[in-house]
Amino acid sequence: CRSWQASLSDKRIKLPICLTLTEGYYHDEHCFYSKSEATFDVLNLPEIQGNRCWGSPFCWLVTCAFDFEISLFNPFSRTRIFLSSLNTIPEVEDWPSKDLFDYSIRKLILCTSPEESDCIVFAIISAGSFFAKPSDEAWTLICHSDRYYLDDAIYFKGNFYGCLHTGEIVLCEATPPKVVELAPPPRVFGFDIFKLDIDTKTWEKVYSLGDRSLFLGNCSTFAIAAADYPSCKPNCIYYSVDGPLLAATLT
């Protein structure tokens, strides 16, 4: 099977890497932090008002409007390149735009400058993971979210790698489009526990649960008095991540 390397060459970044900070969808002004020059710049960008924005290492933003129109926007030259709308994805057609906007679009990732002919955008949305080039008429499905729901993804040395909510790492292949399980989730080595003081609204680190046991899981989280359950240890955390129940005693 081919990797993304077959269509994407490894290019040295020549432009400053920018982080973008914004006040919200309805503001024209966007604040950019340039790590290479350690400066903040505020730009007035009415062109992308009402859009969600994702930064990149190439001085381009990936934007998504409420109608799911996707574009690549250079905040310095004001050049804008439109991609195929996410509405070309069948699962997206019936989404009520504003009601599910924040929930449905998790992340849009730009792999290289759109000035290059092999530019690709990787999308993580509630329906699944997809990719498209600016010249594509539709988005290509990598995987549906019911099997592999990515929390995040990166482009690294010619490939897209995704991280599942469990911590498992997967390789997203382009041809044919599929997900390959690459690395299992890391082991849990310890816990940091904090207690919220409701009155002061501050967090205080806890070093012992005393006579209580804490249960952590994907389905539910609760604490019990160990004395009420003879089989449970006090000052102990029982946890499960899509697997058997494990126990960790605080020391």
Image (cartoon, helix red, strand yellow):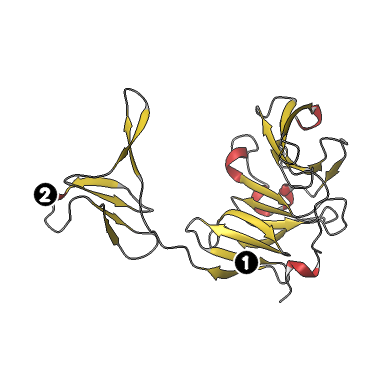
Would residue 206 be found to the left or right of residue 155 on screen? left
Question: What amino acid is found at the position of numbered circle 1 in the picture?
Answer: Leu
Residue at numbered disc 1: 171
Residue at image coords 56%, 58%: 163
Quarter of the figure with the N terminus: bottom right
Q: Position of residue 136 (x, y in %)?
A: 82, 56
Numbered disc 2: secondary structure = helix
Using a 10 Å C-alpha cutoff, classify the residue at mark 1 as few (fewer than 14 neighbours), some (14 to 19) or many (20 or more): some
Reading the image, the residue beneath label 2 is 227
Q: How far apart are marks 2 and 1 (CA)?
A: 47 Å
Q: Relative to 114, is 49 above or below?
A: above
Indicate the position of residue 229 as horizontal and vertical percent values. 13, 53
On the image, the x and y values in percent for residue 181 come to: 56, 70
- Tell me which amino acid carries mark 2: Ala
**For the residue labelled by badge 1, is the local secondary structure a helix, a strand or a loop?**
strand
At a point 38% along the width and 53% down the height, the residue shown is: 218
Query: Residue 219, position in %: x, y?
Result: 36, 52
| Disc 2 packing (10 Å; few <14; some 14–19; many ≥20) | few
Residue 59 in the image: above or below residue 156: above
Q: In which quarter of the image is residue 150?
A: bottom right
The mark total stands at 2
Spot the residue most to the front: 37
